[in-house]
Amino acid sequence: MTRTPLMAGNWKMNLDHLEAVATVQKLAWTLDDAKHSYGDVEVVVCPPFTDLRSVQTLVEADKLGVKYAAQDVSKHTHGAYTGEISAKMLAKLGCAYTVVGHSERREYHGESDALVNEKVRALCAEGITAIVCVGEPLEIRKAGEHVAYTLKQVRDCLADLDDNHLAQVVIAYEPVWAIGTGEVATADDAQEVIGAIRGLVVEMYSAEIADSMRILYGGSVKSSNVAELMAKPDVDGALVGGASLDPVEFAKICRFREHVI
Ligand code: PGA
């Protein structure tokens, strides 16, 4: 099974809607989007909620190949939940993907694996692919318990999903100590955990689902280290934070196949 590589740029709380339009335009232009010369790589940007409508308008008007995603979603479908955004609203805006369970949501908003599981279900119900983030903090890595810790997160975030829901899930392994720190996990570190995640999905669901599921690495990915990470058999793409704010750098990341390792 060949899995389509996925490069997702998580802008976090950066770039307003005007900056978003300029950034996506420059990204598409740099990627030479009209010719899709970056091959089969799926390119996704994850702007803040307030930018999504503007990005949708641009992508539709210029028929860009770049896709877009939200950074979070409510577990509720609708109602009296001040400040929340539903999966249905995101589907209406044409979001193909949505990030859930990012370590910053877990740390600053107390999000649990059980809540992430509910958010995945909410997205699946609307046909949106969840990018489910997992990964260990530094003290767990130092104790050598990173694989067990991360697998438990995956088990709990994906608990009791139907097979057709699973087909709509992407996992992003993001060791917390590597996020925004410049401290990138080695390609072997990434492969160790991502390979173990794929093994767990075989156990929980089936070899077929595990084989088709894309599992990304995230944490200080740049154009200078992406090719080495992508050379690993189980690494199917990257969730890129800081480096995705620069469209030229992010385009270089998307063109990882052209890099020499
Ligand atoms: P970073 O962020 O690339 O800036 O380390 C990754 C992420 O948080 O998704």
Image: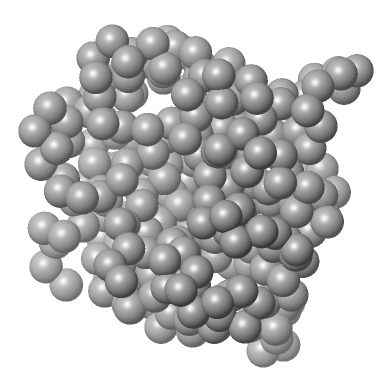
The image position of residue 1, as x and y in percent, is 30, 71
251 versus 2 height, above or below: above
How many numbered circles does the render carry? 0
Question: Up-down: is 184 above or below 199?
Answer: above
> On screen, 22 above or below 190?
above
Q: Position of residue 114 (x, y in %)?
A: 83, 56
Left or right of 36, for residue 103: right
Please say which color scheme the image uses. Answer: one colour
Front position in the image: 53 or 240: 53
Residue 239 visible to the viewer: yes
Residue 225 seen in the figure:
no
Residue at horizontal 10%, vertical 41%?
37
* Observer-nearest of 52 and 86: 86
- On the picture, is 206 further left or further right than 37? right
Q: Residue at x 75, y 65 (%)?
A: 159
Residue found at x 71% / y 46%:
121
